[in-house]
Amino acid sequence: MEKFTTLSGIAAPMPLVNIDTDMIIPKQFLKTIKRSGLGANLFDEMRFTLDGDEIPEFILNQPAYRAAQILVAGDNFGCGSSREHAPWAIADFGIRCVISTSFADIFYSNCFKNGILPIVLPEDQRDALMKDAEKGANARIEVDLEAQTVTSSDGEVFSFEVDTFKKHCLLNGLDDIGLTMEKAASIDTFEAQASAARPWV
Amino acid sequence: MSPKTLYDKIWDAHLAHEAEDGTCLLYIDRHLVHEVTSPQAFEGLRMAGRSVRAPDKTIAVPDHNVPTTLDRANAATMTEDSRVQVEALDKNAKDFGIHYYPVSDVRQGIVHIVGPEQGWTLPGMTVVCGDSHTATHGAFGALAHGIGTSEVEHVLATQTLIQKKSKNMKVEITGKLRPGVTAKDITLSVIGETGTAGGTGYVIEYCGEAIRDLSMEGRMTVCNMAIEGGARAGLIAPDEKTFAYCMGRPQAPKGAEWEAAVAYWKTLFTDEGAHFDKVVTIKGEDIAPVVTWGTSPEDVLPITATVPAAADFEGGKVGAAQRSLDYMDLTPGTPLSDIVIDTVFIGSCTNGRIEDLRAAAAILKGKKIAVSRAMVVPGSGLVRAQAEEEGLADIFKDAGFEWRLAGCSMCLAMNPDQLAPGERCAATSNRNFEGRQGRGGRTHLMSPQMAAAAAITGKLTDVREMM
């Protein structure tokens, strides 16, 4: 997994609430058996017409935001299905950080497995960053995972919370399957005890 | 010992390891797998030279992508990419030695219907699947939730999941339901009350007389949509109905093991005085037959209401409501029962069980549809067979419904069962998101009874007028 340490980039404002995983990556793109290449279809139905032409009003089609690396989004981002194709598409497009007041549980967890940092901030701070993002390509937002801060283009600093273990994995690009396998002895012991207590399982 | 919730008890019984920072490894009893969210996980195992740690606890079935037309045995009915995905599951199931119900097996169906039907899902278990509607299995008092593909790979390799414990939330539905009100109306009404993020960070335990009174099928419908309320999982404490449902299922314990299991299952309830971080109470008698009007499952109103205006909402929801009204092509103030429907879809892991088909058939018996198309997609091959035996299939066919083979079908429209742009559908599924049932398609969620009523009149309809 790609590490996430610091990021300085253009932030695209998406104030819509409840942006769901069907919007992020519609189901017709879930037929792949690979993880790569989904960025071309990120937000497909909002971004392209039925004929495949770009919809110029859509935020990521606007010249200022085509190279956005951060999304500042409305409440409850990533609700809906468990499809990891959503973070795969976001990362493949080049976005490494999403800022909102809240995220759906499974999407939030999926982000950390794919080098994406989802940041939860209170509504007023998210709104301040939304305004900042609306300034366009000259306004770069900075994110520092180690320090757990987001800095607006005006130099205003906001602190965010992140789980210690998730932060450690993201900072170092760690594969958590390998980490869990180091605890195989604990799993073996648990499995033997559980199997004796509940043999029908 | 301090009193525990049902969630606390199941959590504690599956804690394989706890690190100093509170990160836990939760042991997984059942891992359900389908064709869409698993190929990358199996590929990851191959690349790392890893095997499936507990193949006997891993069960696979193709459902999302498979055609539901009667000619599906012919591979040509599948698009190339769908076929590749289903064949990948065939191969992965064989290579890794996991339980498998292929498309050709009568037991094939939607993973969340097959699991309980075969007795894989039992009280007190931990159940995961790369699908958000895994919450369904919570109806048995099993801790069940959806996971992403990286987590699918993690569970395949280690039979554990890295987790932090969620908070406890209680949703109590008191008293009795009124006639014409169903489990679907309960679960939609709860989401209407709490919003799609109201359960974020929580595991919900549903309780109260109205929940106790539900059948297992109804309880599965309620828990199925816990995810639409943002919760990690939904739970209902097991009782005699649960045990009766499980008894004799192919994978359920037998003999002395059954007795031991039931004795354990009877300990699975929330202790008196246990702490809930959030409590929502709704009177059963206050719940009406509901439909959704917008593009979020929280956009719920009684069928007797009118289409709201964006100005009725606050904050970010104002813009979202306007966007929904535009997408759904609805005018504020219109009675919901005036909305004309093109299509009816009965099926999905929310409402594709035998009881759902019975309820819809009871409304449809001797009637004809007034919509341009209507389909019933049974949740499994066994549900389909039972419905045929009970004469339900004939009622649907006589009314003008297509009688399909089992699969997820038009709930997520990955297969050819899709809405055309602008087509308006009365659906028993779980999501009314933009484009969910096909790009530009317009979805109204409701119970099977309400969908049947809409099929007969061609409009959203209060089913109580037909009872």
Image (cartoon, coloured by chain):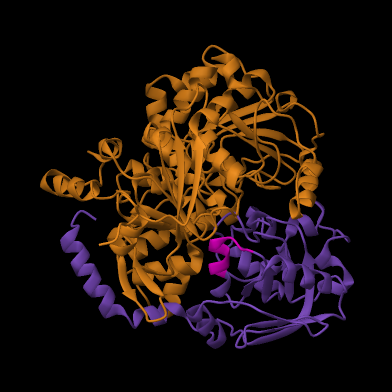
Chain colours: A purple, B orange
Q: Up-down: is B416 above or below B94?
A: above
Q: Which residues are magenta?
A: A102-110
Q: Up-down: is B417 above or below B265?
A: above
Q: Measuring 54% from the left and 25% from the top, which residue is drawn there?
A: B449
Q: Residue furthest top?
A: B366
Q: Measuring 83% from the left and 70% from the top, which residue is drawn there?
A: A131
Q: B183 or B339: nearer the eye?
A: B183
Image location of residue B259, percent across then percent down? 14, 45
Q: Up-down: is B143 above or below B374?
A: below
Q: B400 or B115: nearer the eye?
A: B115
Q: Quadrant of the C terminus of chain A?
A: bottom left
Image location of residue B341, percent across then percent down? 70, 28
Identify the main secondary structure in magenta: helix
- Would residue B204 appear left or right of B191 to someone viewing this image? left
Image location of residue A44, percent across then percent down? 74, 59
Q: Measuring 18% from the left and 47% from the top, which residue is drawn there?
A: B263
